[in-house]
Image (tube, rainbow, N blue to C red):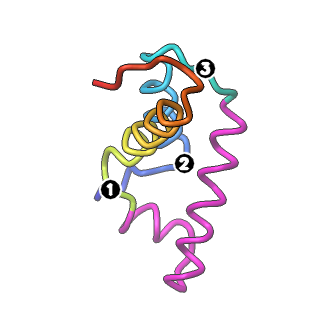
Amino acid sequence: MSPENTLARLADEFLAAMNRHGVHIDRPVVEQEMRERIDAIAEVLRLDTQTVLRDHAQDGWGRQMAAAAIEQIRQDRLLDINWR
């Protein structure tokens, strides 16, 4: 857990991982989805967004989200991607 977890850094992690696999997504779309997920977590935990980012968003969360997205793409056979 890092005090440096910001929406921008998590989006950077996600986009970099996706780009390495040839999947390009518009940054605003990624940031909006992440914002919604973080807001939902904050609501469930009854915390503010910054507290969730600071105390609950683990380092590598953006990469984990990318791995899940790649796996979903593979399962749906939308792209032939090998995740490493």
Q: Quadrant of the N terminus?
A: bottom left
N-terminal-most mark, 1 or 2: 2
Residue assigned mark 2? 7
In this rendering, which labeled residue sits more in front, label 1 or label 3?
3
Q: Quadrant of the C terminus?
A: top left
N-terminal-most mark, 1 or 3: 3
Image x and y of residue 69, in percent: 50, 39
Q: Which residues are magenta?
A: 27-56
Which of the two residues, 73 or 36, is positioned nearer the viewer here?
73
Q: Image point 64% across, 43% down: which residue?
A: 31
Q: What SS does tag 1 mark?
A: loop
In this rendering, which labeled residue sits more in front, label 2 or label 3?
3
| Residue type at the position of mark 3 | His
Q: Is residue 76 left or right of residue 5?
A: right
Residue assigned mark 1? 58
- Reply above or below: 25 against 57: above
Image x and y of residue 11, in percent: 53, 38
Q: What SS does tag 3 mark?
A: loop
Q: Is residue 62 shown in magenta?
A: no
Query: In whole angstroms, how far apart are the C-alphas of marks 1 and 3?
Result: 24 Å
Magenta residues, dominant SS class:
helix
Q: What SS does tag 2 mark?
A: helix
Label 1 crowd bin: few (<14), some (14–19), many (20+), radius 10 Å: some
N-terminal-most mark, 2 or 3: 2
| Residue type at the position of mark 1 | Gln
Residue assigned mark 3? 24
